[in-house]
């Protein structure tokens, strides 16, 4: 693999710092090198510093001139539903007329409509669609995503989705962290307890035998999986070696955050309705909150998670898109940064940290990605702006210039 140097970045946003998720004031410490540069060899970062110093060590390496642009780590999107078939345009129209998430689900829309389309699709069909989605992420500056199953709800269909992710890893340069979300909803043909038994006794053993997932997730919410059911699923997953995540406190303050703390989850996601007690429980158990303001926006809600309070409580906050066809149809982390700043009163610096290094730790990859430091993988983005704050300031405008994964240019403005 060839070597190259990136030179003349207006701001080289390194996120250098402690080898752990960042909290409190650390969220604002971006480790910016003005007029920065990097030397990259065999897909890894070898040297970081001022461009003048890096240039002295270039040798015969190719030079990539950032030409006064921002260079930063690729976004790590820690909550997505990457693999599905179809769309939910009908749901979108109903929501525009004022129907709620719950009303749409009862009328046959919501998760169930995507399940039907995904069950009907072949692995090849799903792979083709997922490749399209993966390229969307890359064009937005995202280099790693956590991706969930959950639109199958039968043993074979859940396995089908996870196998598509495994194949997708071989065919696209977007890096994928697979999560088993068999407990996304209860299929109509089974009772909740009957389906819980299928998830625990049939799905989990197959998923782990084929090594198809690193995490297990559950939608812990009224009318989906209650606290006891969620605990049983997550406990079973933990026993077979999966790390834990959870969709919790999205629609109601259901006690999901406290459950994630109790079971030792890596993350608690959504948290729109989480109160002070839930925040305190997450802090005590060192669980990372993954906040998805794009979902709040797309559902037409005004109840955003208490991001500011979580930061002040000392939580290692993460931002993600929740990319899915129903409640957050966007792969754009820059849009999420804008929402975090305007609706959750996070600073642009805090939002950058939450979507890079903190997100990397939330998918168990903080030692190799999420910051631009010697020894890390060269997953980076050159943005067509001079100041990192512009990523959240100019919204709805693509600012990606070029994207590198493991030192290879995988997307460029206007295509490759």
Image (cartoon, helix red, strand yellow):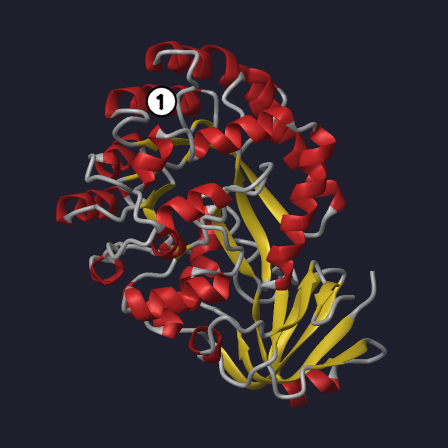
Q: Find residue 226 and report its image quarter.
A: top left
The N terminus lies in which quarter of the figure? bottom right
Q: Nearer the viewer, residue 233 or 94?
A: 94
Q: Determine the image quadrant of residue 225.
A: top left
* 17 lies left or right of 247: right
Instruction: Please give the count of numbered marks on the rendered protein.
Output: 1
Residue 256 screen position, x and y as percent: 25, 35
x, y percent for residue 8 = 65, 86
Q: Secondary structure at mark 1?
A: helix
- For this orientation, the residue located farthest to the left is 277
In this orientation, which residue lies closer to the viewer: 145 or 6? 145
The residue under the point 44% across, 79% down is 389
Q: Please give the residue where the numbered disc 1 appears in the rendered image.
A: 235
- Sort mark 1 into few (<14), some (14-19) or many (20+) by Cα contacts within 10 Å: some
Say which of 257 and 137 sits in front: 137
User: Is residue 329 visible to us here?
Assistant: yes
Residue at image x 72%, y 86%?
Answer: 55
Q: Is residue 395 above or below residue 65?
A: above
* Residue 180 visible in this rendered orientation of the protein: no
Residue 103 percent coordinates (x, y): 31, 35
Residue placed at 40% from the left, 19% from the top? 236
């Amino acid at each position: 693999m060839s070597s190259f140097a990136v030179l003349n970045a207006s701001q080289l946003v390194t996120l250098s710092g402690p080898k752990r998720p960042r909290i409190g004031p650390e969220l604002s410490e971006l480790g910016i090198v003005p007029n920065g540069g990097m030397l990259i060899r065999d897909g890894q970062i070898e040297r970081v510093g001022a461009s003048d110093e890096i240039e002295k060590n270039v040798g015969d390496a190719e030079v990539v001139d950032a030409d006064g642009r921002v260079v930063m780590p690729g976004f790590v999107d820690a909550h997505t539903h990457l693999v599905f078939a179809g769309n939910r345009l009908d749901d979108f129209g109903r929501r525009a007329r004022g129907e709620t998430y719950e009303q749409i689900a009862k009328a046959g829309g919501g998760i169930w409509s995507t399940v039907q389309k995904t069950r009907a699709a072949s692995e090849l069909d799903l792979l083709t669609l997922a490749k399209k989605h993966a390229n969307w992420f890359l064009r937005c500056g995202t280099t790693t995503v956590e991706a969930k199953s959950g639109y199958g709800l039968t043993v074979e269909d859940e396995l089908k989705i996870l196998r598509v992710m495994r194949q997708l890893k071989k065919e696209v340069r977007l890096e994928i962290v697979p999560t088993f979300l068999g407990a996304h909803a209860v299929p109509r043909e089974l009772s909740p307890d009957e389906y819980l038994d299928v998830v625990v006794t049939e799905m989990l053993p197959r998923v782990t035998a084929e090594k198809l997932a690193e995490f297990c997730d559950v939608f812990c919410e009224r009318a989906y999986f209650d606290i006891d059911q969620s605990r049983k699923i997550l406990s079973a997953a933990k026993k077979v070696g999966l790390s834990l995540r959870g969709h919790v406190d999205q629609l109601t303050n259901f006690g999901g955050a406290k459950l994630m703390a109790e079971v030792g989850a890596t993350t608690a996601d959504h948290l729109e309705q989480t109160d002070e007690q839930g925040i305190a429980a997450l802090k005590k158990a060192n669980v990372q909150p993954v906040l998805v303001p794009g979902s709040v926006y797309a559902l037409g809600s005004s109840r955003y998670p208490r991001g500011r309070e979580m930061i002040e409580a000392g939580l290692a906050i993460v931002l993600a898109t929740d990319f899915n066809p129903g409640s957050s149809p966007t792969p754009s982390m820059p849009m999420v940064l804008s929402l975090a700043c305007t609706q959750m009163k996070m600073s642009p610096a805090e939002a950058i940290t939450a979507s890079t290094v903190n997100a990397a730790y939330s998918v168990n990859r903080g030692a190799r990605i999420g910051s631009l430091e010697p020894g890390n993988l060269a997953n980076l983005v050159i943005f067509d702006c001079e100041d990192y704050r512009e990523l959240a300031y100019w919204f709805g405008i693509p600012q990606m210039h070029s994207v590198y994964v493991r030192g290879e240019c995988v997307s460029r403005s206007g295509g490759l």
